[in-house]
Amino acid sequence: MSNPQQTLVVTGASSGFGRVTAERFAAAGWRVFATARDPHGRHAQAAAELERQGVRVIDLEVTDQASVDRAAAEILAAGPIDVLVNNAGAAYFGVVEAFTPETIARQFDVNVFGPMRVSRAFLPGMRDRRSGLVVYVSSGVGRFALPFGGVYSSSKWALEALAETSSYELAPFGVDVAIVEPGAYATNISNSRTGPDDAERLDAYRDVLPLADKVFGALSAATAGRDPREVADAILALAEQPSGTRPLRTPVPSNPGVAAINDAVAPIQRELLANFGLSELLPKIPAHAAR
């Protein structure tokens, strides 16, 4: 399906998964719109490098509704889009109690409300055409919990709930939803974590904090030998699958723990919807990618 008429929009494309996804789709012949914050300022170099690969870079801040509206209008003026990849995100890690509610709200503004703003901007066109794919880049910890990762994980759990729910609601319109669950990779988001902002509360946990070092060390070690382009390849593979055949969840790389959770939950979810008389909204395919 590598067709120059196929159009991708990917958010958070100045680095990491977003950037390699933009590059991968462009190399496959897609028309690509890559969004980034401040592409003429601090991300000017990344924007210029993407432009040289045939990618059109658009200024978009997912936490700013006016910015989302402007970017969407600019993109849609060039024609409809086929695939939207909600990738932009941030990572807040540390003792949950030591984060003020205001800081947790900022985490959710980027990781949850941001994707919802962007999706709302592009879904009307997809629904009208009865065609399209929305990909949400979640995380392995969107399916399980790690100590000191509660703020980040909770935002990804929320994103997965919204994404899965919308997959059922959009099915009658021929629009697919896919959730990609990356493991630990050495990307900008993992290298620029935001920590707690309440120093007094954090100090109360000083005897526990060495355990946090174990968690962060294990996450860092897990990145060894992993290439973020694996995630881009998984997203392209989803885009190239026929509509209605795409799995809801795809862990990358194949993760037995995440896959086991997906396998265990999927039949319960199917039974729940069946009990509500909503079986017609269920896909006729597995809810997760084959391992």
Image: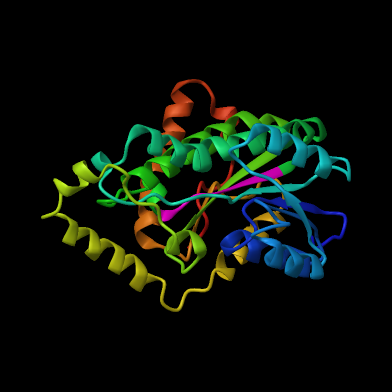
Residue 109 in view: yes
Residue 11 x, y percent position in the rendering: 65, 50
Closer to the camera in the image, 34 or 86? 34
Residue at left 65%, top 58%? 13
Left or right side of 104 for 54: right
Q: Kindly indicate the quadrant of the structure image that contains residue 128.
A: top right
Q: Relative to the observer, which residue lies in front, 226 or 245?
A: 226
**Extreme residue toward the bottom, this view:** 225
Residue 78, horizontal then vertical, whole percent: 89, 45
Q: Which residue is located at x 18 percent, y 56 percent?
A: 209
Q: Which residues are magenta?
A: 133-140
Q: Is residue 278 above or below residue 234?
A: above
139 in the magenta segment? yes
Q: Position of residue 4 (x, y in %)?
A: 87, 60
Q: What coloring was used for the rendering?
A: rainbow
- Front-lying residue, 91 or 165: 91
Q: Is residue 268 visible?
A: no
Quadrant placement of the N terminus: bottom right
